[in-house]
Image (spheres, rainbow, N blue to C red):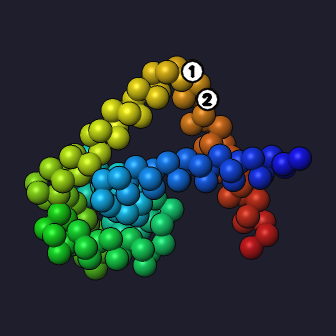
Amino acid sequence: MQTEGQKLWGIWGQANALYSSWAASRGINYYLLFVLYALDGQEAMTQKKICIFTGLTKQTVNSVMKSLKEEGYIALSPGSEDRREKQISLTEKGMAYSDGLLAPLREMEQRVFQIMGSDRVQRMVENLTLYNTVLEKEMEKKM
């Protein structure tokens, strides 16, 4: 019989596999999808904030950033508080690219949310938020 942790890992893995499969069907990798999702609709974010939002490592985000910059999809500007910390934002070309990839995904997600119902979606978000908060506190005790 599976433990609760094993069930959670299985469900989490299945969701990640679905997004990975969707990204692959669009000719992009999972990491690029996550970074575009982080930047989508934002004025600008630092690489650190993108790492926190996506859960990806600094090296992975940096690699995706290099690729996006080479394609002209992102612009880097000095941070307002720390000029060494670069603010990353989508260029017009990047917004068009991102929207072309993410719009169909967002539409699918909205249909899923409608099927699930707003109460279930809200509980899911609240429960995952609580799980992450409690897990983080437990990890801090062990580190």
Q: Amino acid at mark 1?
A: Asp
- SS for tag 2? helix
Q: Residue at the right extreme? A: 1
Q: Residue at the front extreme? A: 25
**Snapshot quadrant of residue 79:** bottom left
Residue 119 numbered mark, or none: 1
Mark 2 surroundings within 10 Å by alpha-carbon count, few (fewer than 14), some (14 through 19), many (20 or more) = few
**Gap between marks 2 and 1 measured at Cα:** 6 Å
Give residue 43's position: percent from left, percent from top. 23, 52
Q: Along the horizontal axis of the image, is 75 left or right of 28?
A: left
- SS for tag 1? helix
The residue depicted at 84 percent of the width and 49 percent of the height is 3
Give residue 110's position: percent from left, percent from top. 39, 29
Q: Quadrant of the C terminus?
A: bottom right
Q: Amino acid at mark 2?
A: Arg
Q: What residue is pinned by disc 2? A: 123
